[in-house]
Image: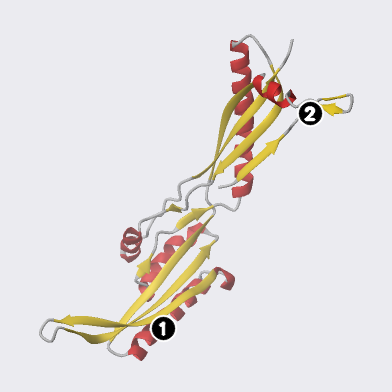
């Protein structure tokens, strides 16, 4: 969320001395209106968070399984022509697994859990289905919902901002006409953007269920909406 504030302050100077009440008078002879603008674009990329959790009685075997699955997934991603810079192994952990023994009232060590997390930036959405299906096939057992993004986000926001500004001026003119007056210059503008929340394409379990199905998966990309709003203070034109 971005906050942009532009202030235009007019000071009246007479005989080298400013008048302290000029700004107050200017605010009194003003109209404050709001405006909104929205731009909808098609997503052209997505980010994915995937992982492998391997369990074994021996730590080395659990870590080895997690490492093997990670390597196989990276091999799959490269086969789909995903750039190395768009694949990151962001976390690797190993921890003991205990189970409560009701007979001894103690925790018994039953094995180890090794985990790897992988982040992928996908710039070709038509490869998403193959990537998810292949991920499950090589042993990935944790898939967070992919999130949609647009490479034109900044341009979309600016277009929404322009629409909001035009909407505010139209609202000011409508209000002024209803009051038999006219608006003049802008005194101040306060603009706020509302970027889209990272939009999940599928719930994690749904993504895995579709990836595990024998049918060719179809993933609906949907749309992304960027919104902006402004609050503008216009000076009332004096007759």
In the displayed structure, 51 sits above or below 144; it is below
Q: How many marks?
A: 2
Q: Which residue is under mark 1?
A: 68
Residue 45: mark in rendering: none
In-image side of 127 versus 191 (left or right): left
Q: Residue at x 85, y 27 (%)?
A: 17
Q: Are marks 1 and 2 in contact (CB under 8 Å)?
A: no
In the displayed structure, 110 sits above or below 144; it is below
Q: Residue at x 35, y 60 (%)?
A: 204
Residue 11: mark in rendering: 2
Q: Within 10 Å of the Cα at label 1, are there few (<14), some (14-19), or many (20+) other Cα atoms?
A: few
Image coordinates of residue 34 in percent, x first then y, are 57, 29
Structural distance between the alpha carbons of marks 1 and 2: 71 Å
Image coordinates of residue 7 in percent, x first then y, are 70, 35
Q: SS at mark 2?
A: loop
- Front-lying residue, 235 or 17: 17
In the displayed structure, 35 sits above or below 111; it is above
In-image side of 135 versus 97 (left or right): right
Image coordinates of residue 226 in percent, x first then y, are 54, 43
- Front-lying residue, 223 or 53: 53
- Front-lying residue, 6 or 67: 6
Instruction: State which quadrant residue 177 falls in.
Output: top right
In-image side of 41 versus 130 (left or right): right
Instruction: State which quadrant residue 168 falls in.
Output: top right
């Amino acid at each position: 969320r971005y906050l942009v504030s532009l202030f235009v302050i007019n000071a009246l100077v007479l005989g080298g001395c400013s008048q302290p009440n000029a700004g107050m008078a200017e605010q009194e002879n003003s109209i404050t209106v709001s405006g909104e603008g929205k731009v909808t674009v098609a997503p052209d990329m997505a980010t994915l968070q995937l992982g492998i959790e391997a369990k074994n009685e021996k730590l080395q075997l659990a870590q080895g399984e997690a490492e093997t699955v990670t390597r196989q997934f990276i091999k799959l991603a490269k086969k789909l022509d995903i750039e190395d810079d768009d694949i990151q192994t962001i976390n690797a952990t190993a921890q003991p697994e205990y189970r409560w023994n009701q007979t001894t009232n103690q925790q018994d060590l039953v094995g180890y859990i090794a985990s790897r997390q992988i982040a992928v930036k996908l710039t070709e959405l038509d490869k998403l289905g193959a990537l998810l299906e292949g991920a499950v096939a090589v042993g990935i057992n944790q898939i967070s919902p992919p999130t949609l993004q647009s490479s034109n986000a900044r341009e979309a926001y600016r277009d929404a901002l322009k629409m909001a500004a035009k909407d505010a001026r139209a609202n000011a003119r409508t209000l002024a006409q209803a009051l038999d007056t006219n608006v003049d210059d802008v005194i101040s503008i306060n603009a706020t953007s509302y970027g889209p929340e990272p939009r999940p394409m599928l719930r994690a379990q749904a993504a895995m269920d579709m990836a595990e199905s024998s049918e060719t998966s179809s993933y609906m990309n949907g749309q992304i909406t960027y919104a902006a709003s402004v609050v503008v203070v216009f000076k009332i034109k004096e007759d």
